[in-house]
Amino acid sequence: MMTGQEYKDSLRKRNIKVYIKGELINSCNVIDHPFIKGHVNSAAMTYDLAHNPAYEDLMTTTSHLTGKKINRFTHIHQSTEDLIKKVKMLRMISQNTGTCYQRCVGFDAMNSLYTVTYEMDQKLGTDYHERFKNYLLHIQETDHMVAGAMTDPKGDRGLRPGQQADPDLFVHVVGKNDEGIVVRGAKAHMTGMVNSHEMLIMPTMGMNEDEKEYAVSCAIPVDAPGVIHIFGRQTNDDRKCEGEIDQGNAQFGIVGGEALTVLEDVFVPWDKVFMCGETEFSGMLVERFACYHRQNYGGCKGGVSDVVIGAAAVMADYSGYGKANHVKEKINEMIHMAETLYACSIACSAEGKQTASGSYYVDPLLANVGKHNVTKLVYDIDRLAQDIGGGITATMPSESDLKNPEIGKYVEKYLKGVSTVPTEDRLRMGRLIENMTGGTALVESMHGAGSPQAQKVMYSKLSNLNHKKQCALKIAGIKEKEK
Amino acid sequence: MDSSIKIGIKFCGNCNPHIDTVGLLKKLKDYFKEIQFVNWDAWDYDVLLILNSCPVGCATCPNFSGPTIIIKSDSIDHNLVSPENIAEETIKKIDEFIRRV
């Protein structure tokens, strides 16, 4: 298993093409860029915590393939206990970073591909599962960070992939020979992509039989020829080029550092191809990945919410109203919502089941309910944090003002709360609330792992509405007419 | 005190720390200066101490056949203990073990 420092050093060896605000960044220095540094630190925690005895019970496990100790982020779930430990691990890491550490996406991609390639081979006689297991062994051995790459740009959402004015709006196979395949297109909103080693491409949705070229899954190094990353902007990101306080979370950043990843005729050898034209399994892969990923959100957002709740409570103490009844009531409401998020993730894990491959899969209905809660409750938690934090979180002067020899004394004097608390501490806490509860951080809760509608469409499929109708008919004393 | 005694330590993953188990271990090390505390996967120890930081106690128990003491934030070996007394009661528990040895 790599340490955080070894992970960072390994990233410097890549020949990756990353553009930020129109500028190509020197490959060796990508991880030092102010826009990216925090996300790298956050991902590095997934490596460092695995070496800390206080966290290793969650952070590490035993490979079912080799019997060796591995980082849990490279593991295939072998039990419901594994699924539960995953959620607890995510909550714990979030408490340490206050933000996304990105590595769950590849983790979920690997778990979904493990199950789907097995079932594909059983039905179609292909050999994708063996290929994938070899790839998994490589990942467990190297401890590489894998970016899960599912979301295509999709162009006109009313049109199928083949109907788009530009066929590249969905990743597709444009060439094939004895050596491998060539893919073209792009993947959007790619969390942790620029600080990963490789990416796992998956189709963005279930494909029809006439859309074979779009039913493609494969592993690609993030620095393969033809791969270009265009790093996304975030709310307040230019503050990363200034001091520390105004960033709120200067060490780890906000959300996952997303990018648009362009695949310009990228060659992929056959041993790294895990689906190529098997349209009937594309929907299954999307659903498996989505549910594994939606499982996470009560863990990671539960942990992030723990930090937000703590920040609101400390800000109230710093400002002298920590003992006010309405503040206590609001803090309790925030706790209720955070634990509700967590409860769904634990529940969908405890109700997980074994798949044909032997690995374990979450309960999809409960996983979707959990993620759907995140699209609402995180907004409510953050709203209450802003309520408790006060208007100061949006209006306070900058770190430069605080440190200015002429006017710093006024910032110090007039932004003071409780007299025993240094003004700088109050400003730091206010900035943490500001940055964790607004802009990019909130949108991630809405759309990460799928927009709310993506969860709702699962309910009619998974919730057994007919049984609910039968219950009501029976209790109301209504006899069904014989068919 | 028998300086050859070794205690294996296994932490839970600390996702919801009601007590500071890292701090608890430090107190134990300070108190039992003659005892060696080793990580659970060293396997060569006389007693295994499982340190759970909340009441759930989800730490995976290693396959160790010797005596095991399970600490949770509110109990020791499933007997309720106030969190503020956990360190003191854990010391007593280890003392009992040493006397038996």
Image (cartoon, helix red, strand yellow):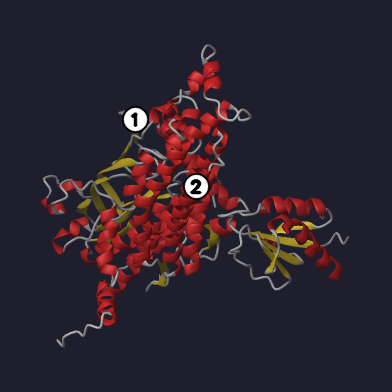
> In this figure, which residue is indicated by the disc labeled 1?
A24
Quadrant of the rendered image containing residue A109:
bottom left
Query: What x and y, as percent, mark residue B95?
Result: 83, 63
Q: Secondary structure at mark 1?
A: strand
Q: Residue at x 54, y 33 (%)?
A: A319
Instruction: Assign the C terminus of chain A to one quadrant of the image.
Output: bottom left
> In this figure, which residue is indicated by the disc labeled 2?
A331
Q: Amino acid at mark 2?
A: Ile
The residue closer to the viewer here, A302 or A121, is A302
Quadrant of the rendered image containing residue B45:
bottom right
Q: Is residue A22 above or below residue A361?
A: above
Whichever of callouts 2 and 1 sits on the residue coming sooner in the sequence is 1
Packing grade of label 1 (10 A; few <14, some 14-19, many >=20) is: some
Letter of the chain that mark 2 sits on in the rendering: A
Query: What x and y, as percent, mark residue A370?
Result: 38, 59
Residue A141 visible somewhere in the drawing: no
Q: CA distance from mark 2 to mark 1?
A: 45 Å
Quadrant of the rendered image containing residue B9:
bottom right
Query: What x and y, as percent, mark residue B68?
Result: 71, 69
Residue B48 visible somewhere in the drawing: yes
Q: Secondary structure at mark 2?
A: helix
Q: Residue at x 34, y 69 (%)?
A: A118
Q: Is residue B8 above or below residue A6?
A: below
